[in-house]
Image: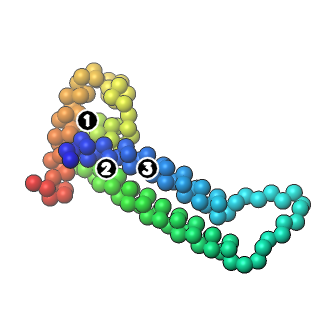
Amino acid sequence: MNIKDWLNRGYYIEREIKMLEAERTKAYNALFPVQKYDGIKVQTSSGNSYQQLQDKLLHYEELLDNRIDTLYDTKCEIFQVISHVGDNVFREILILRYISFHRWEEIADGLNYDIRHVFRLHKKALSAAESVYRELFNMS
């Protein structure tokens, strides 16, 4: 995997985190539903089926949280590499592209550069990020 592919994982990680957080919210809402009674008595059944459901949902939420934590750890690795790139402009381009997920046109406009110049700088920024990656993760 080259450095560009390694950095691009952040985009897919962000999408997965959003999906898992939505799923966690759904599980939470199933566990603690908002109920409206309008003054009507609601009879509940006795037994432990509700407790079993709660236990399953809590376990599911825990699994989701663990996966989200793992994904954030990977995002932290990506950010760690980018934050150690020495050149400010390179770092800014990498953050805008691989952390904030901006389009190339937005990056060029934000930096007041021609898009072709941003592409040239990006190529150099990737080279700098690869050096940092190899240094931080002891890759040769």
For label 3, the SS is helix
Q: Amino acid at mark 3?
A: Glu
Horizontal and vertical percent position of residue 119: 23, 28
- Residue count near mark 1 (Cα–Cα under 10 Å), binned few <14, some 14–19, many ≥20: some
Horizontal and vertical percent position of residue 124: 17, 35
Q: What residue sits right under mark 3 in the picture?
A: 16
Say whether disc 1 or disc 3 marks the residue closer to the N-terminus. 3
Q: Nearer the viewer, residue 32 or 121?
A: 32
Foreground mark, 1 or 3? 3
Q: What residue sits right under mark 1 in the picture?
A: 89
**Residue in the picture at 27% in, 21% down:** 114
For label 2, the SS is helix
- Residue count near mark 2 (Cα–Cα under 10 Å), binned few <14, some 14–19, many ≥20: some
**Alpha-carbon span between mark 3 and mark 2:** 17 Å
Q: Residue furthest right?
A: 39
For label 1, the SS is helix
Q: What residue sits right under mark 2 in the picture?
A: 79
Q: Quadrant of residue 55?
A: bottom right
Q: Amino acid at mark 1?
A: Val
